[in-house]
C-alpha cells in the first residue's frame, strides 16, 4: 500500500472546500472535469434504460451491441481493424491502466512513461514492483518527448511504454512524426504500448491527434484507453473502455471477474447513445474550450515571470512559473498553496505530476469564461503584490 500514490487534484479540492466552508470564495481550476452537463439525449437514454430493465448484471467485457459500436468507432477514427473481442468496457478510464499493467508487468520490468504525467501511471508501475522510467516532456517541443532521451531509455527490460496525447497535465499533443519514430523504435521489440487517448476528441488544430495504433504493425502491440468522461461530460457515469489484442482482452476480463464483475448496464446504454447519437454538444463544448484557452493563456502570459504555451488539446494550461518562483524565493508548490490560501485560486503544482513538472502550475480551464478571467485578475494581483 505504501507504493500507491494519490491524485493531488482531490487533495487540493478538499482543501478548497474547507476554505469555502469558512466563507471564502474559491475559483476551482484544480479538477479535470468538464463543467458542462451530460448531453440531454444521453441522460434520456440512461433513464429509459433503467425503465427498460437494464438494472442487472451484464457480460463482463460489456454489452455486445455497445462493444460493436465502440469497435466500429475506434476502427473508423484510428484506421485499424477492430472487432468486438478486442473491446473491454470498464467503469471509468483508470481500469485500463490498472488491469493491463497488472496482467503484463512483473517485478523488475521497466516502463517508460511521460513526466510530468498522470500520477496513476507511476503509481501502478511502482505498486506492481516494476521500475518506472520517466521521460521528461520538453516545453520547447510542445511538451513532447526528446526523442534522443526516449531512444536511450529503451532497454532489454522495457516491457511497456505509456503514451498520452493529448496530454494531462500539459495539454501537449505528440506530433505525428514523433509517433511514427516511436513506432519504428518499438515495432520489433517485445514491448506493449499503453496509449491513453481519453482526450482524443478535445483538440484545437485541424488535424486529429495520431494514435500509435494506426502505425503499421502497432495495432497488435497497443492498448488504447478511451472513454466518455471528458468528451461527453460523463465523469460521474464511470464509463470507459480499452481496445487491445484479443489475448490481452481475455486476461483483462479475468481481472474484471475477480473485481468489478461488470460495468453498470444502464450506463452502457447511455454510452451507446453518446457514441452513435448527435455530436453537437461535443462540438459546442470544444468550441467553448478553445475560446477559454485563448483568453486564459493570454492572461497568464501577461503576468511578470510567467509564461504559458498554448496547449494543443485537453483543457489544461501548464504555466511556467520558474522565473517568478526564483524572484520570489518560492517553489511552484509554495506558489500553488499561496494562490489557494491568499488569492482564492485553486490550481495544482506541476511537481505533483512528477519531478520534471516542478516549476510549473496546472490550471484546468474547464470552468466558465467569467471565472477564468476573475482568476487571471486574482493571480495578477497576487503576483504584483509580491513583486
Image: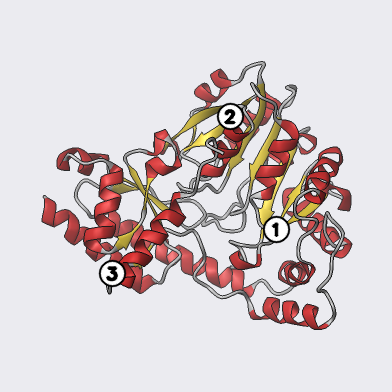
Element class at badge 2: strand
Q: Residue at x 73, y 69 (%)?
A: 267
Where disc 3 sits, the SS reads helix
Report the residue at 84% width, 55% height from top. 60
Q: Name above or below for residue 279 compared with residue 308.
A: below
CA gap between label 2 and label 3 equals 39 Å
The residue indicated by pointer 3 is 374
Residues at circles 1 and 2 in contact by the CB criterion of under 8 Å: no
- Residue 149 shows in this picture: yes
Dot 3 alpha-carbon crowd within 10 angstroms: few under 14, some 14 to 19, many 20 or more? some
Q: Choose the circle earlier in sequence order: 3 or 1.
A: 1
Left or right placement of residue 3 versus residue 380 in this view: right
Residue under circle 1?
A: 91
Q: Quadrant of residue 327?
A: top left
Q: Quickly name the residue at label 2.
A: 112
Residue 184 is left or right of residue 53, and the answer is: left
Amino acid at each position: 500500500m505504501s507504493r500507491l500514490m494519490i491524485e493531488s487534484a482531490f487533495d487540493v479540492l478538499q482543501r478548497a472546500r474547507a476554505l469555502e466552508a469558512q466563507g471564502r470564495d474559491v475559483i476551482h481550476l484544480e479538477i479535470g472535469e468538464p463543467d458542462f452537463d451530460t448531453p440531454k439525449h444521453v441522460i434520456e437514454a440512461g433513464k429509459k434504460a433503467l425503465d427498460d430493465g437494464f438494472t442487472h448484471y451484464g457480460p463482463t467485457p460489456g454489452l455486445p451491441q455497445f462493444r460493436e459500436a465502440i469497435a466500429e468507432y475506434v476502427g473508423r477514427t484510428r484506421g485499424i481493424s477492430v472487432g468486438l473481442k478486442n473491446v473491454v468496457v470498464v467503469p471509468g478510464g483508470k481500469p485500463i491502466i490498472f488491469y493491463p499493467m497488472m496482467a503484463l508487468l512483473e517485478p523488475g520490468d521497466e516502463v517508460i512513461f511521460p513526466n510530468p504525467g498522470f500520477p496513476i501511471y507511476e503509481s501502478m508501475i511502482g505498486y506492481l514492483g516494476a521500475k518506472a522510467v520517466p521521460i521528461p516532456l520538453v516545453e520547447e517541443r510542445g511538451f513532447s518527448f526528446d526523442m534522443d532521451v526516449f531512444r536511450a531509455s529503451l532497454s532489454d527490460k522495457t516491457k511497456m511504454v505509456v503514451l498520452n496525447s493529448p496530454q494531462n497535465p500539459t495539454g501537449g499533443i505528440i506530433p505525428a512524426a514523433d509517433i511514427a519514430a516511436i513506432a519504428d523504435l518499438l515495432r520489433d521489440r517485445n514491448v506493449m504500448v499503453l496509449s491513453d487517448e481519453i482526450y482524443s476528441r478535445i483538440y484545437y488544430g485541424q488535424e486529429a491527434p495520431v494514435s500509435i495504433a494506426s502505425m503499421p504493425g502497432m495495432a497488435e502491440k497497443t492498448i488504447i484507453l478511451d472513454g466518455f468522461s471528458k468528451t461527453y461530460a460523463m465523469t460521474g457515469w464511470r464509463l470507459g473502455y480499452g481496445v487491445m489484442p484479443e489475448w490481452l482482452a481475455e486476461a483483462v476480463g479475468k481481472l474484471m471477474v475477480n473485481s468489478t464483475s461488470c460495468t453498470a448496464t444502464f450506463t452502457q446504454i447511455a454510452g451507446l447513445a453518446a457514441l452513435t447519437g448527435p455530436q453537437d454538444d461535443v462540438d459546442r463544448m470544444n468550441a467553448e474550450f478553445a475560446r477559454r484557452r485563448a483568453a486564459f493563456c493570454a492572461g497568464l502570459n501577461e503576468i511578470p515571470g510567467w509564461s504559458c504555451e498554448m496547449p494543443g488539446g485537453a483543457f489544461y494550461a501548464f504555466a511556467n512559473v520558474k522565473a517568478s518562483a526564483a524572484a520570489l524565493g518560492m517553489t511552484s508548490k509554495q506558489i500553488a498553496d499561496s494562490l489557494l490560501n491568499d488569492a482564492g485560486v485553486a490550481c495544482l503544482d506541476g511537481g505533483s505530476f512528477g519531478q520534471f513538472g516542478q516549476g510549473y502550475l496546472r490550471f484546468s480551464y474547464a470552468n466558465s469564461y467569467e471565472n477564468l478571467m476573475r482568476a487571471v485578475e486574482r493571480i495578477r494581483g497576487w503576483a504584483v503584490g509580491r513583486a
